[in-house]
Image (cartoon, rainbow, N blue to C red):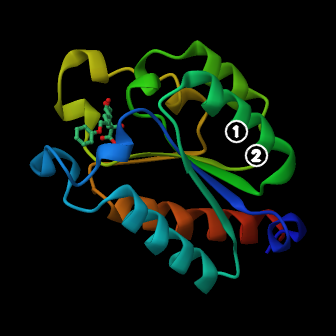
Amino acid sequence: MAKKAKSFPIYVLNGPTLNLLGTREPEVYGRTTLSEIGKRVKERARTHGLDVVFRQSNHEGDLVDWIQEARVQGCAIILNGAAYTHTSIAIHDALRAVQSPIIEVHLSNPHAREPFRHHSFVSTVATGVIVGLKDMGYLLAVDAVANLLKDNNK
Ligand code: CA2
């Protein structure tokens, strides 16, 4: 395990409208609420000896600020940028400055949806991308971070 991970949390950051998870479009995004995902993510991280900061915002600038915070205070970022994934050069630029692992997660598979969801400003700067597995994707992202941090320490 990389030294940094012992005292530095994984930042799990969620973009616009994900606060409504579990209330609408369950066939696309699943039935699990964001707060339940946060709980499961923290439990999974704990099994790897990792802590989690779990946040959601509807505002692009908040996500940029949190990415910058994670850059100095975190060991990795798991990001579901929601709609900003497809539009935000600001988030792309903030992620470019991050040296630790970045895992992009989407509950649905954007590539199987409307063409405007096919391009991601996050994927080009992400270490890895997990799509289409609903809430399970977040847990797999935690496992991926744990493995990447171990590998970094070889
Ligand atoms: O599949 C994902 O995780 C997305 O990031 C979700 C975004 C969408 O813009 C991306 O293309 C893919 C939308 C999040 C909206 O969340 C809702 C939650 C409940 C009800 C309606 C929308």
Res. 64 visible in picture: yes
Q: Which residue is mark 1?
A: 66
**Location of residue 24 by image quarter:** top left
122 relative to 151, above or below: above
Find ligand 1 in the image and state its quadrant.
Answer: top left
Q: Amino acid at mark 1?
A: Trp
Q: Are marks 1 and 2 in contact (CB under 8 Å)?
A: yes
Q: Is residue 61 left or right of residue 26?
A: right
- Residue nearest the viewer, comparing 152 with 119: 119
The residue sitting at 38% across, 56% down in the picture is: 34
Does mark 2's beta carbon lie closer than 8 Å to ligand 1?
A: no
42 relative to 46, above or below: above
Question: Element type at marker 1?
Answer: helix
Q: Amino acid at mark 2?
A: Ala
Q: Position of residue 8 (x, y in %)?
A: 81, 63
Q: Which mark is residue 153?
A: none
Q: Position of residue 110 (x, y in %)?
A: 27, 33
The residue sitting at 87% across, 64% down in the picture is: 4
115 relative to 12, above or below: above
Q: What's the distance in space between the residues labelled 1 and 2, CA to CA?
A: 6 Å
The residue sitting at 28% across, 57% down in the picture is: 133
Q: Is residue 100 left or right of residue 32?
A: right
Q: Position of residue 145 (x, y in %)?
A: 62, 62
From this viewpoint, which residue is outermost toward the bottom? Answer: 47
- The local crowd at label 2, few if under 14, some if 14 to 19, many if 20 or more residues have their Cα within 10 Å, is many
* On-image quarter of the N terminus: bottom right
Res. 99 visible in picture: no
Q: Which mark is residue 70?
A: 2
